[in-house]
Image (tube, rainbow, N blue to C red):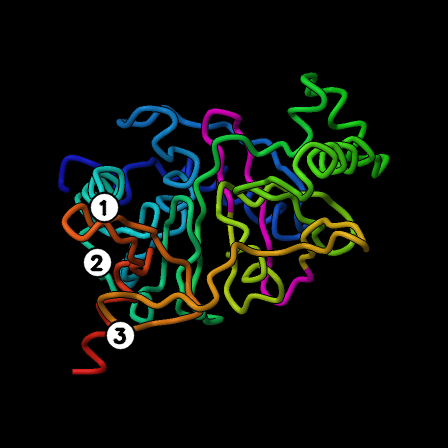
Amino acid sequence: MNNYNFAFFDEGSKREIRRATLKAIALPGYQVPFASREMPIARGWGTGGLQLTLSLVGKNDRLKVIDQGSDESVNAVSIKKLVIGTTGIDETDKTGEATLIQSRHRIPEAELREDQILVLQVPIPEPLREIEPSEYATKRLHADKEYSGVWLMLFEQIMAHGSVATGADHPVLVHDRYVMAPSPIPRFDNPKLDHSQALILLGAGREKKIYAVPPYTKVVSLAFEDYPFEVERMAERQCRLCGAAGVYFDELFDEKTNEKYYQCNDVSYCLQTRISLS
């Protein structure tokens, strides 16, 4: 810890990232370019989210890092080691105790509060990238609020599959203005973005973009009137370990009994539920 500046970055780098973050908060859903730094982890391992975390973390924060619902994956553990090793702050696996949460592919099951910040790692921040490869062109499309390409993409999925086939990263409209990529969270988590009490920040290190959903901001998942937005079907399912229902589950297979079973994807939520029931 003594060999590094607090939170790894020099103070000038932190200020630059914070300025970009403030602009992102002022323009919900708008992608703000920033000078993405070189990090001691590989690009694609959450460098954008990590840079946000390092620029915002304070000495009194408690950090939680999750990767696809787990606090103990290689990605989550590596990020925690870097942040804690250069700050000395406390870590926690309890969502309710954390002030700063960095996540990959999930929004925690427990409802977030006003005094919490959620940082989402983003590989591809541009929702128009599959439609238009040019960065200059996508900027013009956003400026003109021209999102017919996104609607056409969803329409083609319905024609091909009978329903929208976005397994994750389903595009959303933020504050009735910008179409935004919510990061590769499952559709199940999209409703949690709408009027969230917590500040949600999204960072893409490789693409050098920061964007945000401020607290209590309107976020609507794109859908047609005759094909409304639907989350993954989790009804009538129950966690084998804690008995929870109405959460996002992993579907597993028991080779001994040849039967499917379900467990909470959010490992910490599952553990806390079991503790509360014991």
Q: Position of residue 7 (x, y in %)?
A: 28, 43
Which stretch appears magenta? 202-218
Q: Give the residue type at disc 3.
A: Thr
Q: Find out whether the residues at labels 2 and 1 contact each other: C-beta distance under 8 Å.
A: yes
Q: Give the residue type at disc 2.
A: Glu
- Res. 236 image quadrant: bottom left
Q: Position of residue 24 (x, y in %)?
A: 61, 46
Give the vertical position of 124 relative to 24 (above or below): above
Instruction: Rate crowding at label 1 as few (under 14), some (14 to 19) or many (20 or more) other CA atoms within 10 Å.
Output: many
Q: Residue furthest toward the front? A: 258
Instruction: Rate crowding at label 2 as few (under 14), some (14 to 19) or many (20 or more) other CA atoms within 10 Å.
Output: many
Circle 1 — which element? helix
Query: Which residue is label 3 attached to?
Result: 273
On the rendered structure, is 253 left or right of 222? left
Circle 3 — which element? helix
Q: CA distance from mark 2 to mark 1?
A: 8 Å
Query: Which residue is label 2 attached to?
Result: 91
